[in-house]
Amino acid sequence: MKFLTPMNTIEAIEKRLIQHDHRGMSRLRQALEPGYLGRAAELLRTQSGIAYIVTGFPVAGSFETDGPAGAMALYRLCENHHLRPMILSESELTQCLSPTYRCLELATGAREQIHRSVEDLYRRAPPALVISIERPGAARDGRYYNMAGKDITADCTPAEAYLELATCPTIAIGDGGNELGMGNAITALETMDIHPAVSTCNELIVADVSNWAAYALCALTYAQRGNIPDISSDIRDDLSFLVASGAVDGVTGAKTATEDGFAEGAGCLLIEDIIALLNQENLP
């Protein structure tokens, strides 16, 4: 049975995702057409074929817990919704995920080389959906910056081509304004003290923590099918696995199963609240 989620519920979830507003994501939400979470869920439910999931934000010589955990959740969601997912990132992340997940290293080289590599990939294995979650996006000057304004270009593999060359729908998830796809809200971002990313996508989802948006997107999509699995248990397992594989908290730099400096379990508490709301809507 398919359940239709009311728009007011979808908007309530979107507001929950930016309730801390520690990075000004409420301003970005106001710049977006409400219901983006629902439209993204519709894409995940209706598309069929290959889904590329681009993630990985370099920090402290490793990668963040934020992004990969959300990508893992989205991967499982895709497999349950007629999509064949593949996670794209640098070798550090793909090597730790590849025993369990289909992975592909991002194309490297000069931008022209990357462009040709992505064109070739899309000819051989055209995507039905491309999702970016917590992936650095280039600013107007073509360089990459973290939230502190530090130039991290040397640590970043450009991934804009995966969105730009896609002829299918694209979804991007971010929490700071310096990630792929944030160009959808560039006017709002230019009022903030950051180097905003300029690439665009079909549906942009913003949150206090990118993983949390992915978890919420999964919960909403599952709810519309009538059955939400134990997402919280998967979240805990995924974060523990990532930390054991070398991931760090992107804010503290600590090897802890936390996300962007929030207390351990904060994401689980939020998603349990969202699931309770969705289950209430699905009562007969």
Image: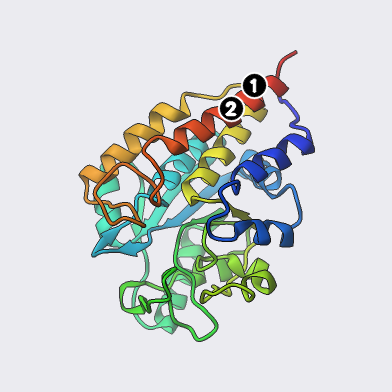
Q: Secondary structure at mark 2?
A: helix
CA–CA distance in space, label 1 to label 2: 6 Å
Residue at 66 percent across and 67 percent down: it is 184
Q: Nearer the viewer, residue 165 or 274?
A: 274
Q: Residues within 10 Å of mark 2 (few under 14, many from 20)?
A: many
Q: Position of residue 40 (x, y in %)?
A: 65, 47
In the image, is 195 to the left or to the right of 42? left
The quadrant of the rendering that contains the C terminus is: top right
Residue at 78 percent across and 38 percent down: it is 7
Residue at 69 percent across and 50 percent down: it is 36
Regarding residue 202, the answer to whether it shows in the image is no
Query: Which kind of residue does numbered mark 2 sit on?
Result: Ile
The color scheme shown is: rainbow
Per the rendering, the mark at residue 279 is 1
Q: Position of residue 5 (x, y in %)?
A: 74, 32
Residue at 65 percent across and 39 percent down: it is 13
Residue farthest toward the bottom in the current orientation of the protein:
141
The quadrant of the rendering that contains the N terminus is: top right
Residue farthest toward the top in the current orientation of the protein:
284
Q: Nearer the viewer, residue 14 or 21?
A: 21
**Labels 1 & 2 near each other (Cβ < 8 A):** yes
Query: Which kind of residue does numbered mark 1 sit on?
Result: Asn
Q: Which residue is mark 2?
A: 275
Q: Secondary structure at mark 1?
A: helix
Q: Nearer the viewer, residue 267 or 47?
A: 267
Q: Residues within 10 Å of mark 1 (few under 14, many from 20)?
A: some
Position above or below: 26 against 199? above
Q: Position of residue 157 (x, y in %)?
A: 37, 72
Q: Position of residue 174 (x, y in %)?
A: 53, 58
Q: Quadrant of residue 144?
A: bottom left
Regarding residue 144, the answer to whether it shows in the image is yes
